[in-house]
Amino acid sequence: MSTEQGYSEAKADLEETFGMVPPPLDTIPEEDAAREWPTFKKYTVGESEIPPKYRELIGLAIAANIKCPYCAHFHGAAAELHGATEAELEEVYFLSSFTARYSSMLHAQEYDLDEFKDKVHQIGGHLQEQLAADD
């Protein structure tokens, strides 16, 4: 299949799916857009191991941390499209800040990564014991 034919098929599918070729796929080289589209499609409108609403909530949290207004707008709107409630969006807003805040503290302290991993495993073991005791 020629690059031109591959792009023509990708463009037709994009237009059928979204009603247009969305940015940034409309501005990158056609060959790259044709290769990018199948993966983009799978993870934006297709089926994967993670349900669409959760994928978009994850995308929103990442967008908040990389401070991208384009991604935040896209993933917030897509999450709502997939049924995210205002309460779920608000929780993502908090969790986004929570992760960044604690990451900043650990980095500023130059906390030892191996020690941190050991403590996470200790906490996990303790929580599992508590769950087992509750059953």
Image (cartoon, rainbow, N blue to C red):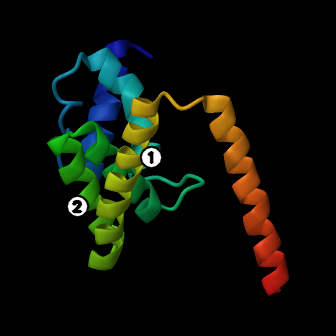
How dense is the environment of label 2, judged by Cα within 10 Å: few (below 14), some, or many (20 and up)?
A: some
Query: Residue 120 appears at what percent x and percent y?
Result: 67, 48
Residue 77: name its quadrant.
Answer: bottom left
| Vertical side of 25 occupied by 84: above or below | below
What element does badge 1 sit on?
helix
Q: Amino acid at mark 1?
A: Tyr
Please identify, in this view, whether the residue under mark 2 or under mark 1 is nearer the observer.
2
Q: Nearer the viewer, residue 82 or 128?
A: 128
Q: Is residue 95 left or right of residue 18?
A: right
Q: Nearer the viewer, residue 130 or 36?
A: 130
Q: Is residue 65 left or right of residue 112?
A: left
The residue wearing badge 2 is: 77
Residue at 30% in and 68% down: 89
Q: Nearer the viewer, residue 47 or 52?
A: 52
Check residue 135 in the rendering and tell me which mark sits there, or answer none.
none
Q: Is residue 72 visible?
A: yes
Q: Is residue 123 left or right of residue 132?
A: left
Count of marks, rendered view:
2
Query: Residue 71 appears at what percent x and percent y?
Result: 24, 44
Q: Quadrant of the N terminus?
A: top left
Residue at 52% in and 55% down: 47
| Vertical side of 6 occupied by 76: above or below | below
What element does badge 2 sit on?
helix
Residue at 74% in and 49% down: 121
Q: Quadrant of the C terminus?
A: bottom right
How dense is the environment of label 1, judged by Cα within 10 Å: few (below 14), some, or many (20 and up)?
A: some
Distance from Cα at disc 2 to Cα at disc 1: 15 Å
Residue at 42% in and 47% down: 102
Q: Is residue 56 visible?
A: no
Q: Nearer the viewer, residue 127 or 3?
A: 127
The residue wearing badge 1 is: 43
Q: Amino acid at mark 2?
A: Ala
